[in-house]
Image (tube, rainbow, N blue to C red):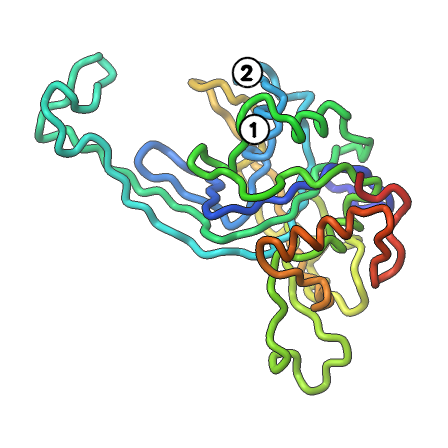
């Protein structure tokens, strides 16, 4: 995509937080990786699960543009996973031919990577910047099938769907951060308005992302940083296919006052932000901002 941001782009806002997340790009069988941020393919799959869509159904009507705010990057966790070890011959893993594995090949191993204690805020918009279907918002509020953060072993903690937004990128910048405020001594002696650096990632240029004064990392905000193989073409079990798409990065210096802490601290801040009576400290929120 080569479009840039304009004001009042409608979208859906998600909060992706939990003990574990995993966003694979090149995962195959016994080696399952994770990227450092939610992928477009995983979020498309999450929406499809919410709608109750079968895997063999086409994806043309689920085209998404994804912009991610990294509240907490978390840390990488490696799980050396074994299946079938120590079982009797009649209970070992079944082969593709329907037979049981012999004792010397009964244990299957895999390496699985996760992000632990990470938190992301995500804006889902449409490539043509029209309003996402109301059915998407309804499904994310009352999903047909269980939703998870990349893998079934990674359920979300707390609310996943934050609401519909009339100006998704404004809200993505202004929503409370799932991050504790740094110590006062970290601000610096000459800091009039303490800030924290926050990374944004998108499949579209970030040069016009709404930002407070003094943003960081603007030089290459409109330049493609790299590519990611996470644009889904087909989710069918035996025919999964993905395309590469561009990845853009930008770091903004956001006010420390936007840090809402962990757990209930951020949830309280989110509830206040989405309240009709809320008045943000950095300019007024757009009319009908988050619903």
Per the image, label 1 sits on a secondary structure element best described as helix
Residue 7 at x, y = what percent?
A: 87, 46
Going from N to C along the chain, the mark reached first, 2 or 1, is 1
Judging depth in this view, the residue of 278 and 82 nearest the camera is: 278
Residue at figure coordinates x 61%, y 53% from the top left: 264
Judging depth in this view, the residue of 124 and 218 nearest the camera is: 124
Residue at figure coordinates x 56%, y 47% from the top left: 17
Residue 203 at x, y = what percent?
A: 66, 43
Residue corresponding to mark 1: 45
Residue 95 at x, y = what percent?
A: 21, 19
Quarter of the rendering containing residue 181: bottom right
Gap between marks 2 and 1 measured at Cα: 10 Å
Q: Is residue 284 left or right of residue 126?
A: right
Question: In which quadrant will I find the C terminus?
Answer: top right
- Relative height, residue 91 to residue 174 (above, below): above
Q: Would you call the spot at circle 2 few (<14 residues within 10 Å), some (14-19), or many (20 or more)? A: few
Q: Which mark is residue 54?
A: 2
């Amino acid at each position: 995509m080569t479009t840039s941001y304009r004001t009042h782009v409608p979208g859906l806002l998600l909060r992706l937080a939990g003990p574990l997340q995993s966003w694979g790009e090149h995962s195959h069988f016994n080696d399952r990786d994770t990227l450092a941020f939610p992928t477009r393919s995983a979020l498309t799959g999450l929406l499809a699960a919410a709608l109750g869509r079968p895997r063999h159904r086409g994806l043309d009507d689920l085209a998404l543009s994804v912009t991610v705010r990294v509240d907490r990057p978390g840390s990488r966790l490696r799980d050396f996973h074994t299946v079938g070890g120590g079982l009797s011959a009649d209970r070992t893993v079944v082969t593709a031919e329907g037979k049981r594995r012999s004792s010397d090949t009964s244990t299957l191993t895999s390496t699985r990577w996760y992000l632990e204690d990470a938190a992301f805020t995500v804006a889902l918009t449409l490539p043509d910047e029209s309003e996402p279907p109301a059915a998407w918002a309804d499904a994310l509020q009352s999903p047909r099938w269980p939703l998870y953060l990349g893998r079934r072993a990674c359920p979300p903690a707390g609310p996943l769907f934050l609401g519909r937004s009339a100006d998704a990128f404004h809200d993505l910048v202004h929503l409370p951060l799932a991050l504790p405020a740094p110590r006062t001594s970290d601000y610096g002696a000459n800091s009039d308005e303490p800030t924290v650096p926050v990374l944004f990632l998108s499949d579209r240029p970030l040069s016009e992302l709404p930002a407070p004064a003094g943003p960081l990392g603007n030089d290459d905000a409109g330049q493609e940083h790299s590519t990611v193989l996470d644009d889904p073409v087909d989710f069918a079990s035996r025919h999964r296919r993905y395309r590469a798409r561009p990845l853009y990065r930008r770091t903004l210096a956001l006010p420390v006052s936007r840090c809402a802490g962990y757990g209930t601290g951020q949830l309280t801040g989110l509830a206040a932000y989405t309240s009709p009576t809320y008045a943000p400290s950095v300019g007024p929120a757009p009319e009908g901002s988050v619903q």
